Amino acid sequence: MRVLQQMGFLWAVTAVVWLATLAFIVRLVQSQHRLHRELEQLERALQDVRRSE
Amino acid sequence: MTKRWIAGIGVVGILGWLCQYFAFIGSPPEKSMGNLIRILYFHASSAWIAFLSFGVAAFFALCYLIRRRPILDQISSSSAEIGVMYTTVTLITGSLWAKPIWNAWWTWDPRLTTTLILWFLYVGYLLLRGSIEGLERRAVVSGVYAIIAVADVPVIHFAVEWWNSIHPQVIDETGINMPGSMLFALMFAFVAFFAIYVLLLAVRTRQEAQRQRLYRLRREIQEVRGRAADKLQPDISAHPQLQMSVPKGSK
């Protein structure tokens, strides 16, 4: 019983470590996509504004 | 995605699996703690990486204040953000170890309390950074903050010696207090976490550079639009009938 309980805590720690790392990576990838899209839009907008200047 | 990135992710993945193997199978249980000693490999490694992250953040912040190159600020802020993630992991894994050993999820032990203060300090750093306008001003203010905040790291290390603490000490003045097989698992976990940190730092720094480019582009568009609006606006001084008349007595 004690060993089982200890293994439960051990697996919980493992899950926390790897899920936190994974969550950080997912957040990075999501914001990377958003940044890429926004950069493209802004570059297009800047070209339009310069043309109309 | 380039081959270099794929190779980096592959190496980190393999190191992660090996770290898991050495922590669960490759190292023996401890006499009094049993299998709970295995939590230490993850907990201590994440704590060391968190301290390293904040040290790197402070070092590059200092370099930025001297050299004023944007890349130095980008590395500093990215490292601090990763440090917050690892401090969170340290606090949660510590709590999961404390419950079966101390029979409490949390105690106001000096080392735990100073680590929690460190977490609040760097969450504050991220909030401060997000609230300041202007790239240079933001870099200078948050850089000074990062240099001051890192002073908590040595306090955490010496908290066990300065105050009455029940937190176990892996490293003290006599050296590292554990047998070779456990030490190997701990050092391997540290290497694996360090590899993850380097990869995350590289990706996050690139992203921060793009973010700053986005900010500059926005400013440029605003300026160009402002200039265009100025050109369209008629010269009011040349047309007195367009000027507003101010009633007498009003302020």
Image (cartoon, helix red, strand yellow):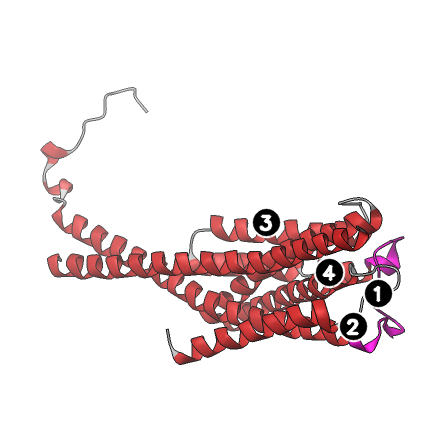
Considering the numbered disc 4 on the image, is that residue within a helix, a strand or a loop?
A: helix
Q: Are marks 4 and 3 in contact (CB under 8 Å)?
A: no
The quarter of the rendered structure image containing the N terminus of chain B is bottom left
Q: Residue at x 78, y 59 (%)?
A: B36
Q: Are marks 2 and 3 in contact (CB under 8 Å)?
A: no
* Distance in Å between CA atoms under marks 2 and 3: 36 Å
Label whose residue precedes the other's in the sequence (2 or 3): 3
Residue at label 2?
B182
Say which chain tag 2 marks. B
Q: Is residue B66 left or right of residue B166?
A: left
Tag 1: Cα neighbours inside 10 Å, few (<14), some, or many (≥20)? Answer: some
Label whose residue precedes the other's in the sequence (4 or 3): 4
Residue at label 4?
B39
Numbered badge on residue B124: 3
Label whose residue precedes the other's in the sequence (1 or 2): 1
* Distance in Å between CA atoms under marks 2 and 4: 12 Å
Label whose residue precedes the other's in the sequence (4 or 1): 1
The amino acid pointed to by label 4 is Ile
Q: Are marks 1 and 2 in contact (CB under 8 Å)?
A: yes
Q: Position of residue B165 (x, y in %)?
A: 87, 54
Say which chain tag 3 marks. B
* Distance in Å between CA atoms under marks 3 and 1: 38 Å
* Distance in Å between CA atoms under marks 4 and 3: 29 Å
Q: Is residue A29 left or right of residue B183?
A: left
The amino acid pointed to by label 1 is Glu
Residue B109 visible in the picture? yes
Numbered badge on residue A18: none
Q: Is residue B75 left or right of residue B30?
A: left
Tag 2: Cα neighbours inside 10 Å, few (<14), some, or many (≥20)? Answer: many
The amino acid pointed to by label 2 is Met
